[in-house]
Image: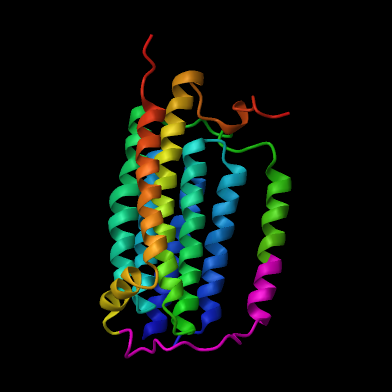
């Protein structure tokens, strides 16, 4: 039997790698991929908690999280393509018009 | 035995996640992201949720990765030049990440599970898909409907956003 903390530590490591991708990379596609990594790590910890608490709520919640993540990717990539048509760049530090 | 498989999948997942954020070619990143999602699906099987593993493979590997690959191909990004793929905010970001890992790692290693244990034991969860389907269509019917509406909105939104404006 694998203890819960192993799953949580794995989830933490994946989460940290995802945060690192969001904060460090300039390419907006990689930033979106890192967001997916973060979603994925959270799903993992939700399922781990559901398994160790012998509950179904976490597993049901993961179904909804996956749906929202799929919707987020569709809209995010649509925004990305619209931005690329306008600005011809995918680097997040060059898209700073909304900064105050 | 289960532990060996856990460490195998966990190691592969962490390695491919690191590859996703460190490789400069976006197509290779997408393929490594797919590998990471497959490892997570395997971990879902270890956590006795085969339905979620199937959903993970269908939606993430089947749909999300293909969307990413389409976007990369459409935009024709190609390789980034060396030293160009990282932000200038690197030191601050690294400090934040290390702080996060330290705080949450201490929290996880010190923490204890004290919530009440539910009714779904390993025997009750044997018919995983059936149990989930029944719950989705009874107790969680309202969020289920809301999510279907959300998907419709996202579909229309994605089409509207990528439509070319008529002159």
Counting from the top left corner in percent of width and height, residue A39 is at 48, 57
Q: Is residue B76 visible?
A: no
Magenta segment range? B102-125
Residue A61: x and y in percent read 44, 66
Q: Is residue B145 magenta?
A: no
The image's colour scheme reads rainbow
Above/below status of B91 relative to B4: above
Q: How many marks?
A: 0
Residue B105 vertical position relative to residue B154 in the rendered view, above or below = below
Tell me the residue at 35%/44% (across/down).
Answer: B152
Q: Is residue B4 visible?
A: yes
Residue at (46%, 60%) from the top-left corner?
A40
Task: Pinpoint residue B85: horizontal percent, then vertical percent.
Answer: 55, 36
| Residue A68 image position (x, y, % from top left) | 43, 53
| Main secondary structure found in the magenta portion | loop
Q: Residue at x 40, y 48 (%)?
A: B150
**Along the horizontal axis of the image, is B49 left or right of A4?**
left
User: Taking A30 as reference, is A38 above or below it?
Assistant: below
Instruction: Work out which quarter of the rendered image holds the C terminus of chain A and state it.
Output: top right
Report the front residue among B35 and B111: B111
The residue depicted at 48 percent of the width and 55 percent of the height is A37
Residue B26: quadrant of the picture: top left
- Please tell me whether residue B4 is drawn above or below residue B15 in the rendered image: below
Location of residue B36 (image quadrant): bottom left
Q: Point out the image quarter for the N terminus of chain A.
A: bottom left
Residue at the far top: name it: B167
Lateral position of residue A7 relative to residue B49, left or right? right
């Amino acid at each position: 039997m694998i203890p819960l903390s192993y799953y949580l530590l794995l989830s933490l490591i994946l989460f940290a790698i995802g945060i690192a991708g969001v904060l460090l990379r300039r390419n907006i596609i990689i930033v979106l991929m890192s967001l997916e990594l973060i979603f994925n790590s959270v799903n993992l910890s939700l399922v781990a908690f559901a398994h160790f608490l012998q509950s179904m709520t976490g597993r049901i919640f993961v179904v909804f999280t996956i749906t929202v993540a799929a919707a987020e990717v569709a809209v995010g990539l649509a925004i990305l393509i619209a931005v690329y048509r306008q600005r011809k760049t995918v680097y997040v530090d060059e898209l700073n018009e909304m900064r105050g | 035995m289960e532990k060996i498989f856990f460490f195998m999948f966990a190691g592969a997942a962490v390695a491919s996640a690191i590859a996703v954020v460190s490789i400069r070619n976006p197509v290779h990143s997408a393929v490594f992201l797919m590998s990471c999602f497959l490892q997570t699906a395997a971990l879902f099987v270890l956590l006795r949720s085969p339905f979620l593993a199937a959903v993970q493979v269908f939606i993430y590997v089947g749909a999300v990765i293909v969307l990413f690959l389409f976007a990369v191909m459409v935009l024709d990004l190609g390789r980034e030049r060396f030293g160009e793929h990282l932000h200038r905010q690197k030191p601050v970001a690294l400090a934040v990440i290390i702080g996060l890992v330290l705080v949450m790692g201490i929290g996880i290693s010190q923490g204890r599970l004290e919530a009440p244990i539910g009714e779904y034991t390993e025997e009750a969860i044997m018919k995983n898909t059936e149990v989930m389907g029944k719950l989705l269509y009874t107790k969680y019917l309202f969020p289920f409907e809301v999510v279907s509406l959300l998907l419709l909105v996202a579909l229309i939104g994605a089409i509207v956003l990528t439509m070319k404006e008529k002159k």
